[in-house]
Amino acid sequence: MNIDIVEAVSQIAKERNINREVLSEIIENIFLSIIKRKYGTIDNFDVFVNMDKGEVEIYQAKTIVEVVEDPITEIGLEQAIALEPDLELGDEYMEIVDPASFGRRLITSAKQGLTQKIREAEKEVLFEEFKDRIGEIIVGDVRQINREEIIVSVENMEVVLKRSDQIYNERFRRGDTLRAVIKLVAQTNRGPEVAISRTDPEFLIRLFEIEVPEIYDGIIEIKSVARSPGDRAKVAVYSNDKRIDAVGACVGLKGVRIQAIVKELNNEKIDVINWSSESEIFIMRSLSPAKPNRIIMNTENKTAVAIIDDDQISLAIGKGGQNRQLASKLTGYEIQTVKESEWEKDSLKEEKLHLMDIPELSSLIKEKLTDAGFDTADEVLDVGEATILEMKGLGKKTVEKIFEVLNSYYEVDSEETGNKEHPEQSSEE
């Protein structure tokens, strides 16, 4: 048992990179647990483990007495002298315990306990090894596929690719090789756990670093990334060297660099755009392939309205709103897309003079006009005095006064603009 256990554990130490001192302590504790179960105490026992020689020595200290009352802690004088003639009453005798004397049941239990302890030690090694590698890409083999996770073997370790970190439209088989980024290393109730991801934006960044040397060297920076894993991604890049085109370097000659990344991500489409410190320009670029006519921004609330030609609005929004959502994530602004025609229509509507904003009209007149369906001064002027006279409760003098007040507003506007006519009337009328 001595040699078998120590040799087996030594081999594990080499294969799994577990500290030999840690394993030596594990073996010692396992034997102490056996001793405790067999003798009920470990107070007078010592266990010495020699990993180099593959030996385990167990010593049991016994006091020499005339009459033995407790055989676990005492030994008779005659028996002790027969073993070592120089011993006397009261001396301590060190008896060597043969592990084989523990019996098969205890030995089997010890081996099981040893296996469990080695697994725990292996998990600790896993935690120590990976805790400083968050954000690093690893390559592993698919070992087991479950409904909620995939177990991946990496450097003789098992790491977890959870369902939420898997690209939804790709499938793996047992034995397949996959790449992913280390997302999380944490202590859980089940012990240390390493979680990897293929959907995290950091994975895309690391792939760009691998395929684009200029990014790895710091010449080109990735300023921000937005992903809808498996479908589309947007990457904003910036060149610290004016001689180097950031987008061109990322795409590569004939697209060879970007295609390598797209292939790794199961044909996820990637838009690479030039980052700008000017938010308005950055937002315009982020909505690619659409080209907004202008951007109206609210920097305080981090919102923006993109005015886009009617025939490009679907490009700006994207399938299921995906393009606009990614642009919002990329820029940090909540972006709203509006058709050019709708924007002009809304602008004209806002410029019209609302009846409720005219203080010269009484509340009663405003109420009668709005009840009749008139909201703006233009609507009343367009129908003329005759139509308004047909309304109940409004006499001729009142109607004349209404039109006098409304026309006075446009007379002021026309004097400022050099045009004394109603804004919706041409000079020929």
Image: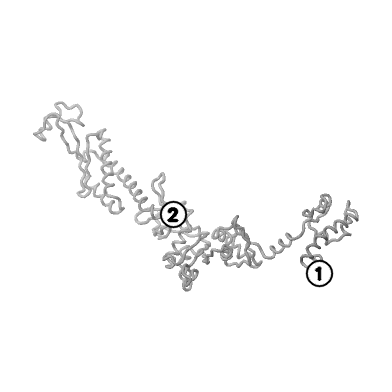
At 88% from the left and 57% from the top, the residue drawn is: 400
Q: On the image, which quarter does residue 27 sit in? A: top left
Q: Is residue 387 left or right of residue 254?
A: right
Helix, strand or loop at label 1? It is loop
Give me the disc on residue 183: 2
How far apart marks 1 and 2 lie (CA) works out to 68 Å
Q: Is residue 271 left or right of residue 96?
A: right
Q: On the image, which quarter does residue 305 sit in? A: bottom right
Specify the quadrant that holds the N terminus. Answer: top left
Given this view, does label 1 or label 2 mark the residue nearer the observer? Answer: 1
**Badge 1: few (under 14), some or many (20 or more) residues near its Cα, within 10 Å?**
few
Q: Of residues 88 and 95, which is closer to you in this image?
A: 88
At 46% from the left and 61% from the top, the residue drawn is: 205
Q: Amino acid at mark 2?
A: Lys
Give me the disc on residue 426: 1
Of all residues shown, which one is farthest toward the front?
A: 416
Q: Amino acid at mark 1?
A: Ser
1 or 2: tag closer to the N-terminus: 2
**Badge 2: few (under 14), some or many (20 or more) residues near its Cα, within 10 Å?**
many
At 53% from the left and 61% from the top, the residue drawn is: 231
| Residue 129 pos. (x, y %) | 35, 53
Helix, strand or loop at label 2? It is strand
| Residue 10 pos. (x, y %) | 25, 50
At 47% from the left and 53% from the top, the residue drawn is: 163
Q: On the image, which quarter does residue 94 sit in? A: top left
